[in-house]
Amino acid sequence: MCLYWGIYYCDCGHVRFQLHRFCRRLFAQLQRINDPEQRGKYLLPFDPNIPGCEPIAVFRDDKPDETQPSKGNVVHWRYNVSEPCPSCEAHSLHRKQDESQRKRG
Ligand SMILES: [Zn+2]
Ligand SMILES: [Zn+2]
């Protein structure tokens, strides 16, 4: 099972995961990509559909529930208030562009 770090964006409640450590099975899959023999054998020498390798976390009231770490594979949560949330960034990009144009003009 792969392990993840979780980032919880306090302002909006969005969640992002960063890979902390590969499990052996996923590492073995990644090694196949670098192996020309394996690349020739399969159409796609990488099968990321390993059960339990996606980030799994328990939430309560839309917040990470750290009282049950054994139920997921997120080893550590960061509560982020300074870094802009990438999910919200995408939505607010239009608005920011409008604002900067107004300032210039
Ligand atoms: Zn894994
Ligand atoms: Zn967000």
Image (spheres, grey):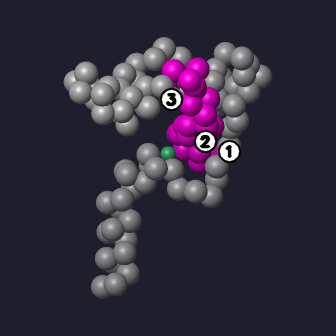
Quadrant for residue 42, please give it.
Answer: top left
| Front in this rendered view, residue 29 or 2 | 29
Helix, strand or loop at disc 1? Answer: strand
Label placed on residue 71: none
The C terminus lies in quadrant? bottom left
Q: Which span of residues is magenta-colored? A: 1-26
Q: Is residue 72 above or below residue 6?
A: above
Q: Is residue 9 above or below residue 68?
A: below
Which residue lies under the disc numbered 3? Answer: 27
Quick one: which residue is furthest to the bottom in this view? 105
- Which of the two marks, 1 or 3, is nearer to us in this view? 3
Side of 91 where 65 appears, left or right? right
x and y, in percent, of residue 36 in the image: 30, 33
Give whichever of discs 2 and 1 has the lower sequence position. Answer: 2
Helix, strand or loop at disc 3? Answer: helix
| Separation (CA) of disc 3 from disc 2 | 23 Å
Q: In this view of the protein, can residue 80 be seen by the observer?
A: yes
Q: Is residue 37 above or below residue 99?
A: above
